[in-house]
Image (cartoon, helix red, strand yellow):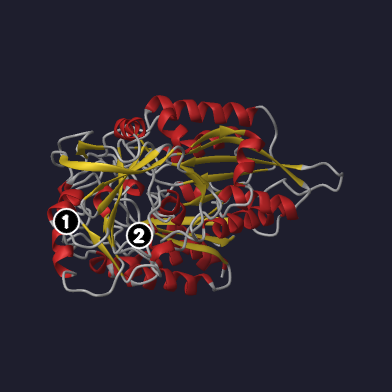
Amino acid sequence: MSVGTANHQPVATGKKMKLGVFQLVHEANSFALNKCDQKIFAEGQWARGHDAAKIEQNSDTELGAVFSFLETHTEWQVTFFRLASASPCGDVTNACFSAVRDELVADIKADTWDALYLCLHGAATVEGGRSAELEVLRAIRTILPDVPIGVSFDMHANLDPELAHLATIAAGYKTHPHIDIKQVAAKVLRLLLSTVRGDIRPTGAIVKLPLLLPSANMRTTDGPMREVVSYAALVEQQQGALDVTVYGGFPYGDCTMSGACCMVYTDNDPALAHRVARDVAGKLWSLKEQFFVPLPSTKEALQSIANTTRYPIAIADNADNPDSGGIADTPSQLRAILDADLAIPTAFCFLLDPELVERCHKAGIGARFRARLGGRLTPEYGPPVECEVEVVRLIEDCSFNNEGPQCTGARRSYGPTAVVKSGNVEIVLATVRHAVTDPGFYRVNGIDFSKIKLLAVKAKNHFRAAFSSVFADIIAVDEPGPAAYGFTNLKFTHVPDEFYPMNPTATFWAGNDPEEEVLLEQEKTST
């Protein structure tokens, strides 16, 4: 099936072509404490219009790619619809999603469009296990059945096969950590333009796997994902292939479309799209066991480096990583660090505690008092850590443009922050919850890695993009938290029990699906 390729040839009248741009970026951890609503989006991005989008004009983001597209394609004009982006947390509330979808529908109905570009994550689960992305595209297609739609996705998207038919052309990130965001968006825009011109007629296919994968060992720099992505890139070189993307999925999203998959777009060759998608999905399936690696606790990690002389070292708590829906409040890693009574300069980044930040700012630098750290939001992951602290630094507004290789130039704000010290450990406290993966955060808060020998951080793989060359070693650890490694212990409502690894004997049906059987038969007949 091909959509959105007819009657959209540019006419040489001097009239501008119209591109509508919409953004909905959220990775839903269905087991996190807080649902995602407009207030949560406002902490990231909740805006409309050209002026709001222009903030990211020079950034390595999807919106940055749109502005670069406009610089070289002056025959187009862009209207920016809702731009919504939130740090991962719980499912999007029905009320918030309905408002976003209905607003977008109204915006689209208000004018005519030559093409649409959607910047989507792909794992924005809505309450009830629904796919926000799927419902957005369905709503658009009821209004614009033939207008070309280009979509970019995160590598950790949970995609329904129907999306490959609703989107005219789509592609996802090929790197993890995600350092190719702008490049992927630019590719989608380039293919979208070729579609509008009639140069190509994209056809897509998504092959799903009954497979939930942890992302701890899903980096594309090494390990099994590197092998699969390299294979996909090789396959993509064949004639007729437009894009081949492997999606690892997000296992903490309890939704009807959870699981890994492969998405392929070809130029007017649906049989090839299905064949390649099944082939690459099979490659991913064959390596599935390699994604599962044991993670030590913080205590075990400290024991393993007790006699090292190679510093600095980072210990990354995957389970409370804000980029996986972590709450930046679990206390177990900090407790292990303080209990170890380390003799080396150490930094802990970070705890979300607006009230304690305010108390520090009122008390002033040099103030000493007894504090309760972590365990503020829920007792589920352990009681607070109680200790004497000294206020050593205060930051009125921890805001900066990203300096590292991921989303370079994008604006990030943690609100007021404070740094307190207990023994040899400096502890950063923040007001707004975002992952701490960029050098700007540490610079603003005065964490100097030429002096710090150990960093305990609530982060995962994205942290490595900027810091692999800084640390002698980065050790991933698992502690109690919303994104703990043992996701098989979670009580899923929408993910089938027969998925691997919940069912170790799960199988991937390598045969042709009914739609593909028809396509292959048509291909034989035409040949």
Q: Amino acid at mark 2?
A: Asn
Q: Residue furthest right?
A: 13
- Which residue is at 73% across, 52% downward? 71
Q: Secondary structure at mark 2?
A: loop
Q: Quadrant of residue 302?
A: bottom left
Q: Is residue 461 above or below residue 414?
A: below
Mark linked to residue 503: 1
Instruction: Write down the residue under mark 2.
Output: 461
Q: Secondary structure at mark 1?
A: loop
**Label 2 packing within 10 angstroms: few (<14), some (14-19), many (20+):** many
In the picture, measured across the screen, residue 350 lies left or right of residue 72, that is: left
Q: Nearer the viewer, residue 129 or 354?
A: 354
What's the distance in space between the residues labelled 1 and 2, CA to CA?
27 Å
Q: Quadrant of residue 424?
A: bottom left
The x and y percentages for residue 478 are 20, 55
Q: Is residue 254 visible?
A: no
Q: Nearer the viewer, residue 235 or 331?
A: 331
Q: Nearer the viewer, residue 414 or 454?
A: 454
In the picture, measured across the screen, residue 279 lies left or right of residue 149, that is: left
Mark linked to residue 303: none
In the picture, measured across the screen, residue 428 lies left or right of residue 119, that is: left
